[in-house]
Amino acid sequence: MYPLLRSLLFSMDAETSHEVTMAALRLFGALPGLRQSLQRRSNRVGDGAGRRLMGMDFAHPVGLAAGLDKDARAVEGLARLGFSFVEVGTVTPRPQPGNPRPRLFRVPEASALINRMGFNNLGMLEMARRLEALRRRDRLGSTRVGINVGKNKDTPLDVAAEDYTACMRTLYPYADYLTLNLSSPNTPGLRTLQSGDALATLLGRIKDCQAQLTRQHGRAVPVLLKIAPDLALEDLEIIARQLVAHEMDGVIATNTTISRPGLQSHPLASQAGGLSGSPLLPLALDVVGQLRQLLGPDVPVIGVGGIMCADDGRAMLARGADLLQIYTGLIYRGPGLVRALSRL
Ligand SMILES: Cc1cc2nc3c(=O)[nH]c(=O)nc-3n(C[C@H](O)[C@H](O)[C@H](O)COP(=O)(O)O)c2cc1C
């Protein structure tokens, strides 16, 4: 069934097919019976595939990675596809249009995508409005919702912490966890926040904000860091030390890569942006493996990058990931991939 649907979707340009898919997922989520079907799944939390992490139960290890549902348009439809958690965003304080189109390219020969979307999103207030309505409808069962936050393109890097904390304050009540996106290649300078003093200062501000929000809301929402696959081992060591020093709740590895492994001679390789899908898997596996060694067994790690089949998911778990996320695999392999990974 999915190969047929995929041919149809791939006959459109990549961003149009994304919009059509999101509209369909919205409808899919609005159909009756969602609460009952997710309730059946929640009842299976203890059946072997379930995971407990960051003080929460996950029905199974596979979630949706950030960037597909940037504005929380179709969380219920995505839950119905079978994800145990859905990460929405990246959302920024103010709405912004992102980069001019075209900004999303398929590389089917490599089961890959290149994107330079640039955090196109409707802003944190619209996100809060939608998530509040979603919580009120209460149809998500045990599906967890993560919110991935970033900074506006025109916010100077030295005050980036203001953007992250503004999003945290506004979205905290609706989040099962929050992710700080420091690793998109499509916001100039963003990735420099992953290193040295900039990281230490930012994490200090985030932890203060988290402590204050925990007191205010009487509930601790975990905050994770999402990192790039293009870091040298020394950079990863610094990140790991900072994660531990600031008692961050976990890490998501990885975002898209600015490298073009195996694609150097492909006509699309020179398109600016981040590469995702199959060619990213070896890089993401290495980063997750190194992180696990650096962090020891207790810090939660969510593995993402190029997971296209159950064996890839198994490999990611074997390197030390506690949970998995997919994006490009869903585009190329369809919802069958969610089902396959949910049994790991
Ligand atoms: C079109 C597109 C948009 C993305 N947007 C975001 C984003 O807004 N925030 C983010 O943290 N990651 C974003 N990502 C990265 C994914 O969440 C994921 O980390 C990456 O694609 C690797 O996983 P995959 O190979 O399964 O796609 C985006 C990826 C794609 C393909």
Image (spheres, grey):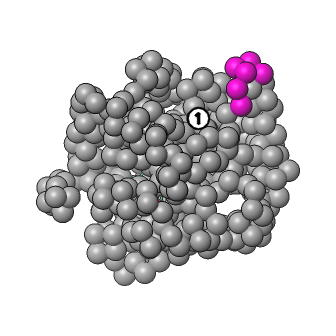
Residue 57 appears left or right of 195: left
- In front here: 141 or 303? 141
Residue 53 x %, y %: 64, 48
Residue 231 found in image quarter: bottom right
Q: Residues within 10 Å of mark 1 (few under 14, many from 20)?
A: many
Q: Is residue 219 magenta?
A: yes
Q: Amino acid at mark 1?
A: Asp
Residue at the spot 56% in from the left edge and 56% down from the top edge: 323
Visible residue check, residue 284: no
Please give the range of residues in magenta: 215-220
In this view, the residue in front, 290 or 182, is 290
> In the image, 15: left or right of 90?
left
Confirm whether residue 116 shows in the render. Answer: yes
Residue 243 image point, x, y percent: 77, 52
Q: Position of residue 173 (x, y in %)?
A: 60, 23
Q: Which image quadrant: the N terminus?
A: bottom left
Q: Hey, which quadrant is residue 156 in on the image?
A: top right
Q: Nearer the viewer, residue 9 or 263?
A: 9
Q: Residue at x 25, y 36 (%)?
A: 28
Q: Which residue occupies the extreme right position in the image?
A: 245
Q: Residue at x 23, y 39 (%)?
A: 24
Residue position for label 1: 176
Q: Specify whether 21 is left or right of 201.
A: left
